[in-house]
Image: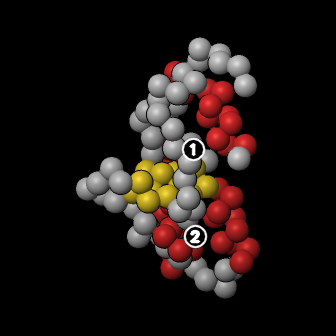
Amino acid sequence: MVETRVKVGDLMTRNFSWITPDTNLKTCAKTMIKKRVGSLIVKEKDSDNLKGIITEKDIVWAVVKKSKEDLSNILVKDIMKRRVITIKPSADITEALRRIKR
C-alpha cells in the first residue's frame, strides 16, 4: 500500500465514550443512544487498560440469542469483544487499513 501522509491521529476520536465490564446491556444501550455512538470502549473505571469493545451488533446478538433474559441481567463482559486491534496515532492510515483487513 502507498503511504498517504494522513495519520491515524488526524482521523481518530480522542474523547471516546467508555463503560466498565460490569455495566449491564440496558445501561450500555442507553449510553450509546445518549452519546449517539455505535460502539463503546470497555475499560476499568480507574485504569486506562483496554478490556474490549462492545458494538450495537453485539447488543442485537444478545437480544436475539438471550431473548429470555432481561438486558439488565446481561453484563458487557459476557458479550464484549476482547480482541481489539490498536495502532499508534502517528501511524499512516494505510497501515491501519492493512491491519483491519487481516
Up/down of 99 relative to 6, above or below: below
> 10 Å neighbourhood of mark 2: few (<14), some, or many (≥20)?
some
Q: Position of residue 101 (x, y in %)?
A: 72, 43
Quarter occupied by residue 43: bottom left
Q: At 34% from the left edge and 60% from the top edge, which residue is drawn?
A: 44
Label 2 belongs to which residue?
A: 79
In the structure shown, which secondary structural element does the residue marked by tag 1 occupy? loop
Do the residues under discs 1 and 2 have CB atoms within 8 angstroms?
no
Residue sitting nearer the eye, 20 or 81? 81
> 10 Å neighbourhood of mark 1: few (<14), some, or many (≥20)?
some
Q: Looking at the image, is mark 1 or mark 2 earlier in the sequence?
A: 1
Which corner quadrant holds the N terminus?
top right
Mark 1 belongs to which amino acid? Val
Name the colouring of the figure. secondary structure
Q: At 35% from the left edge and 54% from the top edge, which residue is drawn?
A: 49
In the structure shown, which secondary structural element does the residue marked by tag 2 occupy? helix
Residue sitting nearer the eye, 72 or 74? 74
Label 1 belongs to which residue?
A: 37
What number is the disc on residue 20? Answer: none
Q: At 50% from the left edge and 68% from the top edge, which residue is drawn?
A: 76
Whether residue 31 appears in this view of the structure is no
Q: At 41% from the left edge and 70% from the top edge, which residue is drawn?
A: 22
